[in-house]
Amino acid sequence: MNEYEIAGIETIARGVCVRDAKILLCKAKGSSTTYLPGGHIEFGETGREALTREMMEETGLAATPRNFLGVVENNFLQHGKPHAEINLVYSMDVEGEEVSAKEDWIEFVWWPLDDLEGARLLPERFRALSASPDTFFAP
């Protein structure tokens, strides 16, 4: 393998859920960074289907993807190898007030929209969501 061989390119569906000036974020336990909830799109799924499935698997709650907000590409090193992901981003509603993880390695937090810098949200492009979460991707 040469230095330019990539570890993989993933396609991920992510949701932007905002309530009371807070955004729902996910993080690996013990991590200092956060990300928008969602997960990998499986073969044959639409982005909306994947987001609905991932939220049910990770929280046990029904999620309803709404408007397609846009695409965010991200390149980074993972275990020392170049890695890439394509994030399909949707506005999203989640049932219930309390959102807790069914998987023991992650947790969900409602983070103030006006402090996304403090959340260390990745990819960094998402930190601009605080300006206008519903029109973030609009031209």
Image (cartoon, rainbow, N blue to C red):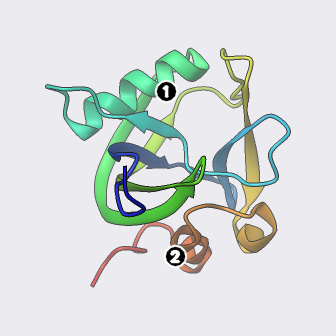
Q: In this view, does 57 lie above or below 64?
A: above
Judged from this view, the residue extending furthest toward the front is 1
23 vs 127, nearest the viewer: 127
Q: Which residue is drawn at 57% across and 80% down?
A: 131
In which image quadrant can residue 96 be found?
top right
Q: Do the residues labelled 1 and 2 touch (CB within 8 Å)?
A: no
Q: Quadrant of the C terminus?
A: bottom left
Q: Residue at x 52, y 62 (%)?
A: 76
Give the side of residue 107 with respect to residue 92, left or right. Answer: right
Q: What residue type is labelled 2?
A: Ser
Instruction: Name the residue carrying label 2.
Output: 132
Q: In this view, does 91 lie above or below 134?
A: above
- CA separation, marks 1 and 2? 23 Å
Image coordinates for residue 106, horizontal then vertical, percent: 71, 29
Instruction: Name the residue carrying label 1.
Output: 55
Image coordinates for residue 118, horizontal then vertical, percent: 81, 68
Q: Which amino acid does label 1 sit on?
A: Met
In which image quadrant can residue 31 be found?
top right
Closer to the eye: label 1 or 2: 1
Judged from this view, the residue extending furthest toward the right is 30
Q: Which of marks 1 and 2 is nearer the N terminus?
A: 1
Q: Residues within 10 Å of mark 2 (few under 14, many from 20)?
A: few
